[in-house]
Amino acid sequence: MFDQLFDGALLESVFRALIPILLAAIGGLVCERAGVFQISLEGMMLVGAFAAVAGSYLGQSALLGVTIAMAVTALFSLILGYGAVTRRGDPIVLGVAVNLLALGLTSFLLPQLFGVRGVFQHPRIDGLDRLAIPFLSDLPLIGQALFNLTIPGYLSLLAIPLIWLFLFRTPIGLRLRGVGERPASAETLGVSSTQYKYAAVVFSGLACGLAGAQLALGNVVQFAENMSSGRGWIAVVAVMLGRAHPAGVLGASALFGFAEGLGFRLQGNGLPVQITEALPYVVTLIALALARKRFQRILELTAA
């Protein structure tokens, strides 16, 4: 039973579940570093998925669908940017509002544009192809899981070291961190916190657009109402658990991706769907509880 469950197919399921969460979490990570608490990842991923399917259907091109998804979510993210940065509103309230707007907007546009409710799938929708890396994709166990991904899949993994280099080894990245950690000090040095925060919010929109495109065109080739299904919220938790560090966010996202992938495999082995679908969220709650205890212990030791 153990050998049948933990095999190469499980790793493929894990990476398929990991990529959308990781892409959205990368956007949330950059926002967190810029001092904007980004909890609208769920809504922006949903908008990205809808825009990707619409673009792919209308243009019969997956590349066009991905491009439109990123452009639309970048524009959609300006709602949060204007409210939280320009008007200095509460980013949590604004984030919840953006998530609700995304859910209502996509549910409204689905029958208006495509004449269906619930799920939209059509032969004209062009899905994202997987690109196998020669020789590496033939490796046992990890080959198909790690070296036979879509372009967004490869970008999500490459983004981790690139984001680390950007944040900790470039002047712009250091200024962005300064804006998030010491905004008043950054302003005295001539750094515009408004520009950096807007850039971070728009980047999160681009990342969520890519995440939505992977979800709708890479994992499946369709759009379903509320198909993000809490993955954006899991990405928010991944940023919190990873403490907005690229390596930590990758580890937290991998944990949740493993939970979701394992849930799919257990479902295929006869476990009730209600249990398997709840598994990623149970893992999220447990991780949050453990992290809270750990942070409290650190505070107690510091105080002592």
Image (tube, rainbow, N blue to C red):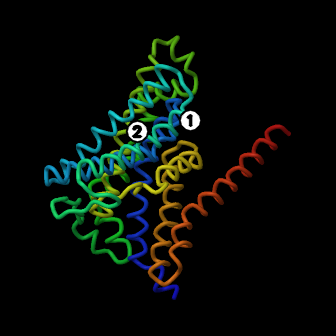
Q: Position of residue 76 (x, y in %)?
A: 36, 35
Q: Position of residue 291 (x, y in %)?
A: 67, 52
Q: Residue at x 48, y 53 (%)?
A: 250
Say what secondary structure mark 1 lies in: helix
Give the alpha-carbon distance from disc 2 to disc 1, as whole Å. 15 Å
Q: Residue at x 56, y 16 (%)?
A: 185
Q: Residue at x 47, y 35 (%)?
A: 31
Residue 102, label in figure: none
Q: For residue 136, what is the image quadrant? A: bottom left
User: The disc labelled 1 sits on which kind of residue?
Assistant: Ile
Q: Position of residue 86 (x, y in %)?
A: 46, 20
Precedes in sequence: disc 2 or disc 1: 1
Most foreground residue, 221 or 101: 101
User: Neighbour class for label 2 at 10 Å: few (<14), some, many (≥20)?
Assistant: many
- Residue lying furthest right: 304
Q: Is residue 12 left or right of residue 130?
A: right
Quarter of the picture containing the C terminus is: top right
Tally of marks: 2
User: The disc labelled 2 sits on which kind of residue?
Assistant: Ser
Q: Residue at x 49, y 72 (%)?
A: 262
Most foreground residue, 172 or 129: 129
- Which residue is labeled 1 in the image? 92
Whether the residues at callouts 2 and 1 have beta carbons within 8 Å, the answer is no
Q: Is residue 221 left or right of residue 203?
A: left
Most foreground residue, 278 or 29: 278
- Which residue is labeled 2 in the image? 204
Q: Position of residue 96 (x, y in %)?
A: 52, 39
Most foreground residue, 117 or 296: 117
Q: Is residue 98 left or right of residue 66?
A: right
- Residue lying furthest bottom: 1
